[in-house]
Structure formats: C-alpha cells, structure tokens
Image (tube, grey):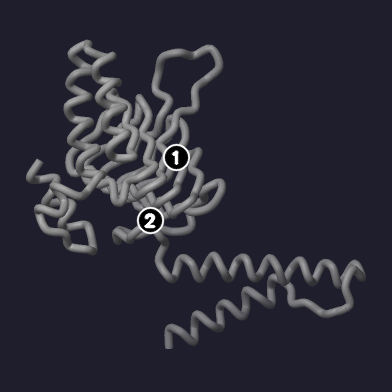
Amino acid sequence: MFDLIKSIQERDPAKPTFAEVFFAYNGFHAVMWHRMNNRLWHLGLKGLARFFANVSRIFTGIEIHPEANIGKNFFIDHGTGVVIGQTAVIEDNVTIYHGVTLGGVGKVGAVNGKRHPTLKEGAIVGSGAQVLGDITIGVHAKIGSNSVVTSDIPDGATAIGIPARVIGGDDKARAYGMPSREEMQDVTFTIDCIIREMGKIKRELNLEEESSEGMEDCLSKKHVNQVDAAE
C-alpha cells in the first residue's frame, strides 16, 4: 500500500500528500478493493468477489473484474468511468486515466481464453481510450486520449486516432499519453499535404478554379521549415 501511494505521489503533477491519496483518490481505493477481490476470486469465492467488486464500483466509479491480473504501482488517475475486463493483464508502473476501457473481443463460439488487452510495464493510456481485444500495449508505450486500439502497439511507441496508428515514440512519460510536439507537427504536416493534394486533383479535374499546391510542394515546404528550425 505504501509503495503504491508513493508511486502515485511521484507520478501525479499535483504532488498530493499521503493523506490526500489515502482518503481522496478513487483510483487508489479501487486498486485496494481489487487486491481483496482478486484473492477472494482465487479462493473460489467468486460470487463474493463479484459482490465486493460491485460495491467498489459504486463507491469509486471504477469497474475492475476480480480476475484481472494487476501488477505493482498501478495508477488510475481521476478514475471515473474506467472499465477493466476479466482477462486483462496490467504489469508494473502502468498509468491510465478516466474513461479508459480495457475491453474484451471474444471469438464466436469461444467461451474461455484471453479476450482482453495486456499492458506492459510503464504503459500510459490517455482518458477515453478504448483498448479492445487480446492485444499488447508495449513497454512504455503511450496511447493518446480517445483513441481506439485494436492491434498491438510496439514498445516505446506513441499511438493516436481511430483506429489508433503509431506516429512516433520515445521514452518520456507524458500526461494522457499525448505525443511530443515534434510528433504532432509531423501529423499536421501530413494532413495539410493531403488537403493540398486533394485541392490539386480537383483543379486538374476542373472541379474548382482556384489553384492548389500538390503533395510535392507541401513536403518541400516541410523540409524548408525543418531546416529553418534546426538553424
């Protein structure tokens, strides 16, 4: 318990006191409830474990299936609306935010087997993200807020979008799993180039009269901007 509170104090920018975490952090409360419920589940008291898991959900707003496998120092920041499914595996030092779903995607006719994601050590999942199916989020990988993830994300990668796509990656932990400024610049440049290319195609097809720059022009501008920034 003390190690968990210490890890929350280290990772939360608000720098809460011990008492704040102990009395007021619903993510901490949910994890402590789950530790008891998980033991009851493995003792064969499944009905009782599910009952206390429901009590925990009522008090914390966080739903964790008693069988879910959760490692050390699991930080649920803000917490409300989090759902963690039965066969989810969460390794040490993982951080997730409110509204995250670690959901199961079962196969037709299959009753048993792993249906939920695995979050490797140090992974960060931003608020509202939906991580679905038996997939793996790699070591220190980051999932941006409101992304929908249905495939594996490599170690150290940053993924955003619907469906989530890898746009870069580094070893820095950022709140809400957000990408770096450089990664976001790459994404916005790409989108801008696509829009300009569409305009060029429309012009060539006489769908619009205004001239538009093409992809090559746009990418050349990106290169010039990067050179100027480096200087």
* Image location of residue 58, percent across then percent down: 31, 34
In the image, what residue occupies the spot 50% across and 71% down?
Answer: 185
Total number of numbered discs in the rendering? 2
Residue in the image at 43% along x and 54% along y: 144
Q: Is residue 138 above or below residue 201?
A: above
Q: Quadrant of residue 55?
A: top left
224 above or below 106?
below
Q: Return the mark for residue 144.
A: none
Dot 1 amino acid type: Val
Mark closer to the chain start, 2 or 1: 1
Horizontal and vertical percent position of residue 119: 33, 39
Q: Is residue 54 above or below residue 177?
A: above
Q: Residues within 10 Å of mark 2 (few under 14, many from 20)?
A: many
Query: How far apart are the alpha carbons under marks 2 and 1?
Result: 13 Å
Q: Secondary structure at mark 2?
A: helix
Measured along the vertical axis of the image, is residue 189 above or below residue 48? below
Q: Between residues 15 and 119, which one lies in front from this camera angle?
A: 15
Task: Tell me which amino acid carries mark 2.
Answer: Gly
How packed mark 1 is, by other alpha carbons closer than 10 Å (few <14, some 14-19, many 20 or more), is many
Q: What is the x, y in percent for residue 126?
A: 39, 52
Q: Secondary structure at mark 1?
A: strand
Q: Quadrant of the N terminus?
A: top left
Q: Split into 4 quadrants, where in the image is the C terminus?
A: bottom left
Q: Which residue is mark 2?
A: 177
Which residue is denoted by mark 1 in the rendering?
131
Front residue of this view, candidates 113 and 11: 11
